[in-house]
Amino acid sequence: MAISRNLKNRSKPRSPIILISLSAAAITFLFILYSSSSSLDFSFSSPKALKNLLRDRKQKQSLDKYLYWGDRIDCPGKHCDSCEGLGHQESSLRCALEEALFLQRTFVMPSRMCINPIHNKKGILHQSDNASSEDRWAANSCSMDSLYDLDLISDTVPVILDNSKMWYHVLLTSMKLGNRGVAHVEGVDRVDLKESNVYSNLLLINRTASPLSWFMECKDRNNRSAITLPYSFLPLMAAKTLRDVADQVKGLLGDYDAVHVRRGDKIKTRKDRFGLYRTLHPHLDRDTRPEFILLRIKKWIPPGRTLFIASNERTPGFFSPLSVSYNLAYSSNYSSIIDPVVKNNYQLFIIERLILRGAKTFVKTFKEDETDLSLTDDPKKNTKKWQIPVYSLDDSEGT
C-alpha cells in the first residue's frame, strides 16, 4: 500500500489532514481486503510483530517511527513513467536509506523495483500496447526481496515493505493520530526533520510531497561526512539466493582476477554542426577494446591467470583476443548454476558484481576511488563536454 504521490497537488496545495480524510475509506477497505487474503499470521497489537521485523538491533533506540519516500524508486520526478538502470536506482535507494538511518526511523521500502527494458535481455517482458502506465510498470518490475536481503539491510537500517501488514497498520494509525500522525514534507533539510519538534515526534514522515526524484535529493550534497552508507552497501546486501550462486561460481573459478568492461550504454556519439562525431567519453571505446585492455592490465595481472569478464558488450567473441594471455571466463560458462535462479538482468548483474568483488585483482572500467584500478582515465561522471573520440595510443599511455 502506498501513499499516493498525488496527495499533494503541485499547482494547488491542499491540507494533509483533508487529503488523509479523503483517502481513509479507501485505505481501510484495502487494508481489510489485504488482511483477509494474506497468509502472514502476526498480530498488530503485539509488540513482537515490529520486533521480529527489526531483528537483532545493534542500536538500542526505539524505532517506532517511519520514513516513506514513495512506492517507486525515483518517483515522483522525471522517472515516474520511465525507469533508470540499477546503478541509478541504487544511488537513490541508498540516499533514502541514509536519511532513515540519520533520522533513526524505519524506512518503508518499495516492494518492487522497475527494470529498464534496455538493461533486460535475460527475460522477455510481455506487455500490451493498450496497457495502462501502471500495468506496464508492474510488468517491467521485480520484487525487491528477489534482489536484496531485507533482513540483512535491517541490521543497519530497519526496513519494512510497502505491501506489508505493518505498513497498513502504520497508515491506519497515522490517520487516527491526525496532525501527530503524518507530515508531507517538501524542501525540508534532514537536520531540520531530526531536530524540529514539529517533525521529530511524528509517527510518519512522507517525502512523496517533493517533486524531486529520489536521486536528486542527495545529488548535490557538499558535506561528504553526511554520506553514511558507502557505495558498496547495497551490492553487499544481495539476496541470499544470489549470494549463494555467486559463491558457487567463485568456488569453481578458484584463484582468479576480474575485469568489468562497460561499453554499450556509455559509448554513444552524435554529430556536431560540422558533421564530426563527438562523445562524452573520448577514450572509452579505445580503452575497452581487447588490444588496449591487454596493454593496460598487464602491469596488474600476470599472463596465465584466470580472468573473469563481466561486460555489456554484445558482440560475440569480442574479448577473445585476450585469450592469448589469460584463461577467460564469463558468467555464461556457469549457466547451469545461474539460469535456474536468474529471471532478469538486474539479478545477473548483482551476481556478477559479487564475483567481481571476490577476485584477487579487480579492474573497473572507470576509476571511482583513488585506489581503484581502471581501464580508462576518462571520468565516469557526465562532464557534458562532447569531444572527438580518440583511437590512437600515445607512447606514454601504454607504459
Image (tube, helix red, strand yellow):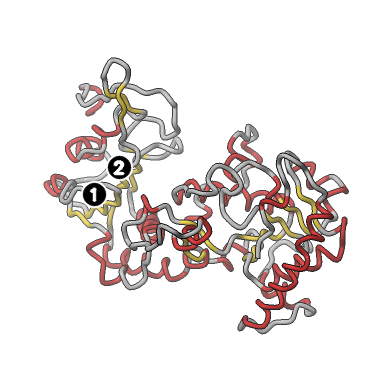
Q: Nearer the viewer, residue 128 or 74?
A: 128
User: What SS does tag 2 mark?
Assistant: loop
Q: In this picture, is 248 found above or below 133?
A: below
Seen at 13% across and 45% down, the residue is: 321
Seen at 30% across and 37% down, the residue is: 375
Is any atom of residue 340 visible in this view? Answer: yes
Seen at 30% across and 44% down, the residue is: 261
Seen at 34% across and 30% down, the residue is: 281
Q: Nearer the viewer, residue 141 or 337?
A: 141
What distance separates the C-alpha of mark 1 from that of mark 2? 8 Å
Total labels drawn: 2
Q: Quadrant of residue 352?
A: bottom left
Residue highlighted by disc 1: 314
Q: Quadrant of residue 203?
A: bottom right
Q: In this picture, is 362 found above or below 378?
A: below
Residue highlighted by disc 2: 264
Residues under numbered marks 1 and 2 in contact, where contact means CB atoms less than 8 Å apart: yes
Number of residues whose C-alpha sits closer than 10 Å to that of mark 1, classed few (under 14), some (14–19) or many (20 or more)? few
Residue 226: horizontal and vertical position, in percent? 66, 41
Is any atom of residue 358 visible in this view? Answer: no
Residue 166: horizontal and vertical position, in percent? 70, 71
Name the residue at the top extreme: 274
* Disc 1 residue type (three-letter): Arg
Q: Nearer the viewer, residue 274 or 361?
A: 274
